[in-house]
Amino acid sequence: MEYAIHCENLTKRFGDRIAVNSLSISIRKGSIYGFLGPNGSGKSTTIRMLCGLLVPTSGKGTVLGYDVMTQSEEIKQRIGYMSQKFSLYEDLTVEENLDFYAGIYGIDGERRKQRKKELIAMAGLTGREKQLAGSLSGGWKQRLALSCALLHQPELLILDEPTAGVDPVSRRIFWNVIRDLARQGITVLVTTHYMDEAQTCDWIGFIFFGNLLAQGTPAELIARLQVDNLEDVFVTLVQREEERQAAARNRRTEERA
Amino acid sequence: MKRFSMSRYLSIVRKEIIQIKRDRPSLGIALMMPLLLMLLFGYAVNTDVNHIRTAVWDQSKSAASRELVDNFVNTQYFDVAAYTESYAEIERLIDDGTVDAAIVIPPDYARKRDNNEPVSVQMLINGSDPNIARTASANAQLIVQNKAIALQERRMQKEGMGKLEQPIQLQARVLFNPNMESIVFNIPGLIGLIMQNVTMILTAFSLVREKERGTMEQLIVTPIRPFELMLGKITPYVFIGLLSFTIVLVLGIYWFGVPLKGSFPLLMTLSLLFLITTLSLGIFLSTVAKTQLQAMQMAFALILPSVLLSGFMFPRDTMPTVIQWLGGLVPLTYFLEILRGIFLKGVGLDSLWRDTLGMAAFFVLILTIAILRFRKKIE
């Protein structure tokens, strides 16, 4: 089995705080992996380590066969990344943003024209090419960001809460694109808080307090925890973990007493 | 992959130009600020002392004493601001700052002078500003001495002894700035000082702005290399810097009347080197600063050493060696020598190669440090 992302015991500490604790995941090529967990659980930190934005404290990881510790530049050439916060240039127009990233990825001439046309059509941005990115509404901004992340036809797409605060139409477009890409063989790693989105992922990982609590297909997880739906899976896992940690704290207090 | 990519570099340049064009107020400040600062400080940094306000206590009240006062006024160094009748009054005038000097002519001045008896004239000087005091004292000395020689000559001619010959005479010739006008010395320095601080701030903001707006995160997941990014950010500002440099240069030459003795192409070439050096210094600051406010504070922190250590205010030759070395950490230090050399002395590269080399070394060093400091990571 070939993996797009494979990591073992990936750990990130910020001073005393462990943001990601010994995380091991494997993501199959061409699959959609949904990364779930409460806010501040370590999702973004994991993603940033995989993109080469943060250096792991310990552990191993490969992305598309390249080492996250030493080959982050090779990884950067081959992945598309969209961060939680809109991070394109608001004082540039839609087209100027696309042109900028096309140049950064070395796409020019006919290919640039072609890609731009395809992506503007895909994102439904036709007619807004000359509009400043800053004046787009939330959903449009996210679609533009996705277009920029896809310009260089990456083998792996990493999306950090791409649909947070986005209207249903944009969300629908977004997921249609994601599923389309997966069919073309592109691997997608996506974080989300929407369970309907998670439901359609091939594989799901739950992360809480930096620990991976469970992973599997949506159906497997629902069956394993004997609940009705993914939302219950989420809540059950979080509650169990909180109880476990509370018990551990009590034990420590008792031992000290 | 490891090679310098023209496409990535040009993309950055193009993006920066679009952003500068859309941010008219900032562009306006970059071009107008040097002009305004130049007009403001061009007048302020004048260290020439003349028209010293002077009180006169003429106890002689004679044609001879009036002639002496006229001799003082004619030099332009002294202006009679008040006539007084007592020491108490003089003291009060100096105390409240109405005058900085006072001439006291004794009652017997005219009689003694006409009788060829020695006579003293007193001058009181406010010494709290040594610059004024020195000028007043030195010039008063000269005026009185010339007057004495003239009197002596007149008397000897009357006695039929011919012209007075002085056994030793000093023939001083001041090179480069014959009238010793401080403006000729200060304006080139001011051009350098203003340009350094304005251009440094331009690039100091540009990287930090991307950090603050969050656009840096998207940029560093691309294959962009630090060198391409920094060079791309500096390039458009070189042209803005050159434009505003030309503006202050024209102002200095045509408005303040500072003659350019040396080669104009050489001045522009070395100014270009200076601009890329200060722009790189700005980039370096922005790799240290986390916010635009911090970048601003750092740029401001550099202004004082630039003024005090570069030789702008005080001659570097008289500074302790260690302080002279510290001055070498400010690009302005090298550029001042170059500016004054080309402006005032009209010298060429054969005299300026040391400073040119120093500045070039500073540029390479600071850009290298900036590139090494810039990590494609999130802190």
Image: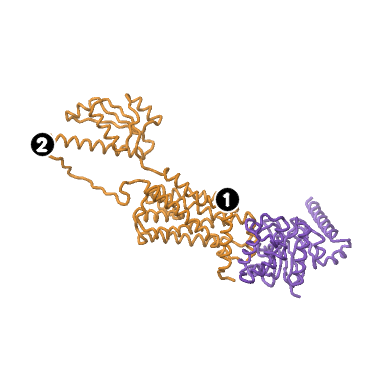
**Res. A58 in view:** no
Q: The C terminus of chain B appears in which quarter of the rendering?
A: bottom right
Q: Secondary structure at mark 2?
A: loop
Residue underneath mark 2: B160
Which amino acid type is marked by label 1? Gln
Circles 2 and 1: CB distance less than 8 Å? no
Q: Badge 1 is on which residue?
A: B294
Upstream in the sequence, badge 2 or badge 1?
2
Mark 2 → mark 1, Cα distance in angstroms: 80 Å
Q: Chain of mark 2?
A: B
- Residue B17 picture location, percent across and down: 56, 59
Residue B147 in which image quadrant: top left
Residue B349 at x, y percent in the picture: 37, 61
Crowd tier of the residue under label 2, counting other residues whose Cα lies within 10 Å: few below 14, some 14–19, many 20 or above: few
Q: Position of residue A128 (x, y in %)?
A: 68, 60
Q: Residue furthest front?
A: A127
Looking at the colours in the rendered structure, which chain would you say is drawn in purple?
Answer: A
User: Is B263 or B204 nearer to us in this picture?
Assistant: B263
